[in-house]
Image (cartoon, grey):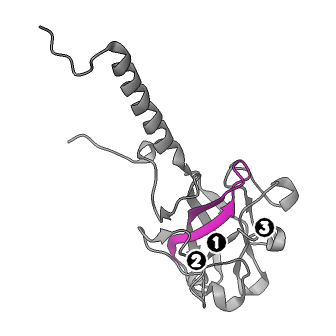
Amino acid sequence: MINRKYPSALAAVLAASALMAASHGAMAAVICNNTPISIPNNIDGVYINFVTGTTGTSSGAVPGFDFDPYAGGADGMNFYFGGGADANNGAVFDGTIYPVLANGTVIGAASTFALGTADTTMTAWRAGTTGFLGVRFTNEATSAANFGWVNLTTTAGTGFPATVNSYCYDNTGADIMAGTTPVSLQSFSVD
């Protein structure tokens, strides 16, 4: 007698298909870009569309941009999220500043977001740091609010020179932890 885990070949195929679909969906949820982007020290900065990965030095060159880090004159680094064009856009705000988030900080529906910057709100980023900025934006492919993070390196004084090291977002609209990347982007070694 043959001992079978599944009573029929059809059941085995259905089980395998369900596993494949579940695995694909889990991998597709977190989208990342690990290509460093230099932030120009000027009033335009760099416009970034998280969904398409497009960058440029004007909003017209990057339709649907989600984030624009730029130099606000002598005062230094500022963030622009598209103004009143999209109420979903913004960054995690603690009521006083845009904080530098630690790895593992949850960014999501329970977070407080703001989209305007002023000298006092940017102090943590102008101090010179490498850390995470929590963001919320409308995903133009799904029309849903998505949560993500941007890993930035800034320099003490004005925040410049500055670099966007990477960014990730969850395209399902679920919360995300700062620093979360899909398994496919993680480094492994065999000992």
The answer to the question of whether label 3 and label 1 lie on touching residues, with beta carbons closer than 8 A, is no
SS assignment at label 2: strand
Of callouts 3 and 1, the N-terminal one:
3
The residue drawn where x is 72% and y is 54% is 143
- Note whether 89 is above or below 10 in the view shown: below
Magenta highlight: main SS: strand
Q: Residue furthest left?
A: 1
What x and y, as percent, mark residue 62?
A: 80, 54
The residue drawn where x is 65% and y is 75% is 160
Dot 2 corresponds to which residue?
A: 155
The disc at residue 86 is 3
Residue nearest the viewer, comparing 125 with 28: 28
Tell us which disc is closer to us: 3 or 2.
3
Amino acid carrying label 3: it is Asp
| Left or right side of 22 for 99 | right
Tell us which disc is closer to us: 3 or 1.
3
Dot 1 corresponds to which residue?
A: 161
The answer to the question of whether label 2 and label 1 lie on touching residues, with beta carbons closer than 8 A, is yes
The answer to the question of whether label 3 and label 2 lie on touching residues, with beta carbons closer than 8 A, is no
* Label 3: how many Cα within 10 Å (few below 14, some 14–19, many 20+): some
* Label 1: how many Cα within 10 Å (few below 14, some 14–19, many 20+): some
| Left or right side of 1 for 83 | right
Q: Which residues are magenta?
A: 129-150
Q: CA distance from mark 3 to mark 1?
A: 28 Å
